[in-house]
């Protein structure tokens, strides 16, 4: 706390001093060239300063703003990363965050129950709760969940301007939960004239989506506001072999899931002076997800329950405000931020068991997070850049359930924790051959102690060859969730209690690779080897006492190793035709018992092509292949988490967009064109062939 307080006081002082300098700078620069737009960054090289506009080229984005917390050419840092632009999302018509992430190298996305269902993101074979997700600088991993992972199930892509995926341990800059990597999402900023729009879409599985909003700028004020409503009704996610096993009747075979999602995305900004601006972003989500799963079918046909259905209501709000100041003629660039996130989940199970309600009182899961942060960058030009920063988090958690019978004692558990951190990073180059960044961070947590993490990420440019050799090494950690620390649920014959003595999971990882550019940078390909070792893995534990009561808890009992290869090829064959290919090989095993980790497919291949035959007509095609994996059996008495084997699958998706005129655009897409029937995870069928279409009105 003392470290954070001192840094915060210093940052406020610097911000105050800088405002005075900014006003002076503003008056001096009245006749200077105008400030670059929000979608442009200045990248310096030995010959000149180049202003690069995001999304203007056909090849993948060349500028990262997350790998070093400042605009950096992707060639000049050793971090393995993928950058997804708003244009790519719109061309491929990926409406949900899970859809777009499932096609990226190094990631495996698992979703139960189809659109809207719970989603887990595994990166490089690591657990899903070891991936940190940020939205406009706010950390948004779900503190109301059991393990603290980010659930992308209800996140739509409307309003997202770019998504950066940083693979490998990133705790040296981003702290806890970033031991596998970081997914950094940025809301698009409005620029130019007032541009309102309305988009209507319908299609398979009762889909009916509506989105409307406006973006633009007026003087010093810029804005982007979007409202959305997504609806899906009638998707049956129970595989036919499970229906046959449990003797499902006609009604049960046609019982479908339903999802209703309403959202608001806001980004506002005001340029107070030439060098000082204020920003506000917000994303609000309200969803109602009704499901009928294999476990509900099991309850009805195996245990005699009647009318069992599940419903999850979610209300989530993410808000962040920033003050950004560039002072001393560009020497010092700093950001002061304040963010808040809250999540409210209500889970209900309807139906009766021997004439009594199955679950008469809902289960509630609530969490909140308050974040105060500051970081500043000293730009020493040819001598590099020095970044320093500090953050403070206050997290709260509550779960409750009212007792409803002699078998149900109810519970009400609340807990909180504080984290204070400081970090620093140096970034530079030698002779425009050796580039790189090195950082270190100190985190002090009120529940699981103090941790120091680090990372180095060099990149070597071989002169005159177009060859870049990249590498990185670093450490990471993931702290136990408040649920894992303090859960307290006791019933007749069972209990689930947290373990306040849990330690944080820790990781050491490295990667190394080569990238090659040919044909005047129109062809770019490369491969990266990675290796991660984890200890103190947190897993659930079970003990049976003398009364034969089942007592569940959590313990640090395992260690694991994950290694593999990521390869890619991007080719802009013509000005209107491009191909993107990626391949991931993952080997992930629990070193305690030499068992393959759950839900980690060994092979993943993705191919995407975009073709614009005439000016306003664009086609996009995608092929995704995923190999088999180990999983939890859903039929029989076997209970180990890896005793079943999921079958590999591949899907083909196509999309078309046509702009009739400046006011009207029409589009259509077909997902899973060959109607492949596959589960991921086992027991949860994924959508078969479905078509969608719609139109968008612009002004």
Image: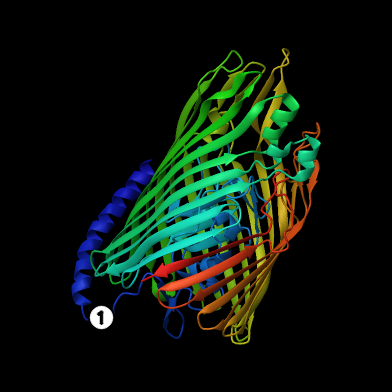
User: What residue is drawn where x is 44% and y is 70%?
Assistant: 384
User: What residue is drawn where x is 49% and y is 23%?
Assistant: 412
Q: Position of residue 198 (x, y in %)?
A: 41, 63
Q: Visible in this render: residue 665? A: yes
User: What residue is drawn where x is 25% and y is 70%?
Assistant: 274
Nearer the observer, 147 or 394: 147
In the image, residue 684 sits, relative to residue 623, either above or below, namely above
Q: Which quarter of the rendering shows the C terminus?
A: bottom left
Q: Position of residue 239 (x, y in %)?
A: 74, 45
**What colouring does the structure picture have?**
rainbow
Quarter occupied by residue 191:
bottom left
> Is 641 on the left-hand or right-hand side of 285?
right
Q: On the image, numbered disc 1 is attached to which residue?
A: 32
Q: Residues within 10 Å of mark 1 (few under 14, many from 20)?
A: few
How many numbered badges does the structure rendering display? 1
In the image, residue 508 sits, relative to residue 52, either above or below, namely above
Q: Visible in this render: residue 64? A: no
Q: Position of residue 123 (x, y in %)?
A: 63, 54
């Amino acid at each position: 706390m003392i470290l954070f307080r001192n840094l915060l006081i210093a940052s406020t002082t610097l911000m105050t001093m800088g405002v005075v300098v900014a006003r002076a700078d503003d008056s001096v620069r009245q006749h200077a060239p105008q400030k670059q737009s929000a979608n442009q960054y200045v990248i310096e090289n030995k010959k000149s300063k180049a202003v690069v506009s995001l999304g203007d080229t056909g090849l993948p984005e060349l500028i990262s703003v997350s790998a070093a917390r400042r605009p950096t050419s992707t060639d000049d840092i050793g971090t393995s990363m993928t950058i997804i632009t708003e244009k790519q999302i719109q061309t491929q018509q990926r409406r949900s965050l899970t859809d777009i992430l499932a096609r990226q190298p190094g990631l495996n996305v698992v979703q139960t129950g189809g659109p809207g269902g719970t989603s887990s993101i595994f990166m490089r074979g690591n657990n899903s709760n070891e991936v940190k997700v940020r939205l406009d600088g706010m950390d948004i991993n779900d503190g109301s969940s059991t393990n603290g992972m980010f659930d992308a199930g209800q996140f739509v892509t409307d309003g997202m301007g770019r998504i950066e995926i940083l693979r490998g341990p990133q705790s040296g800059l981003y702290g806890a939960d970033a031991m596998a990597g970081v997914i950094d999402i940025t809301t698009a900023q409005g620029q130019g004239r007032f541009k309102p729009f309305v988009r209507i879409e319908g299609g398979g599985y009762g889909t009916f989506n509506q989105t409307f909003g406006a973006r633009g700028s007026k003087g010093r004020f810029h804005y982007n506001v979007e409202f959305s409503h997504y609806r899906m009704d009638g998707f049956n996610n129970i595989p036919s072999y499970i229906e046959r096993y449990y003797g499902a009747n006609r009604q049960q075979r046609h019982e479908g899931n339903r999802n209703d999602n309403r959202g608001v995305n806001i980004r506002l900004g005001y340029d107070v002076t030439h060098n000082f601006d204020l920003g506000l972003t917000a994303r609000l989500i309200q969803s109602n997800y009704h499901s009928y799963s294999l476990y509900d079918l099991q309850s009805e046909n195996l245990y005699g329950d009647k009318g069992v259905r599940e419903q999850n209501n979610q209300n989530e709000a993410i808000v962040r405000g920033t003050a950004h100041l560039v002072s001393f003629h560009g020497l010092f660039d700093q950001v002061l931020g304040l963010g808040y996130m809250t999540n409210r989940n209500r889970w209900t199970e309807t139906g009766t068991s021997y004439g009594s309600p199955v679950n008469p009182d809902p289960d509630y899961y609530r969490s909140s997070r308050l974040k105060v942060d500051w970081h500043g960058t000293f730009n020493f030009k040819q001598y590099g850049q020095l970044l320093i920063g500090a953050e403070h988090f206050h997290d709260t958690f509550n779960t409750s359930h009212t007792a409803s019978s002699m078998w149900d004692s109810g519970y009400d558990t609340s807990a909180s924790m504080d984290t204070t951190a400081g970090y620093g990073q140096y970034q530079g180059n030698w002779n425009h051959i050796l580039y790189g960044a090195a950082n270190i961070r100190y985190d002090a947590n009120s529940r699981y102690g103090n941790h120091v993490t680090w990372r180095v990420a060099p990149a070597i440019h071989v002169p005159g060859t177009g060859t870049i050799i990249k590498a990185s090494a670093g450490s990471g950690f993931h702290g136990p969730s408040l649920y894992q620390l303090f859960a307290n649920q006791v019933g007749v014959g069972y209990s689930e209690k947290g373990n306040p003595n849990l330690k944080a999971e820790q990781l050491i990882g490295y990667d190394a690779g080569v990238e090659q550019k040919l044909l005047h940078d129109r062809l770019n390909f490369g491969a990266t080897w990675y290796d991660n070792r984890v200890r103190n893995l947190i897993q659930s534990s079970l003990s049976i006492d003398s009364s034969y009561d089942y007592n569940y808890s959590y313990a640090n009992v395992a260690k694991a190793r994950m290694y593999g290869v990521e390869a890619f090829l991007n080719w802009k064959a013509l000005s209107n035709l491009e191909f993107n290919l990626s391949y991931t090989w993952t080997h992930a095993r629990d070193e305690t018992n030499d068992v393959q980790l759950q839900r980690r497919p060994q092979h993943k291949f993705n191919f995407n092509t975009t073709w614009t035959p005439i000016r306003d007509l664009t086609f996009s095609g995608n092929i995704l292949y995923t190999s088999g994996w180990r999983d939890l059996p859903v039929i029989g008495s076997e209970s180990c988490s890896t005793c079943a084997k999921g079958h590999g699958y591949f899907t083909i998706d196509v999309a078309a967009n046509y702009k009739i005129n400046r006011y009207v655009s029409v589009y259509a897409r077909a997902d899973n064109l060959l109607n492949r029937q596959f589960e991921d995870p086992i027991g949860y069928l994924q959508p078969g062939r479905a078509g969608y279409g719609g139109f968008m009105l612009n002004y």
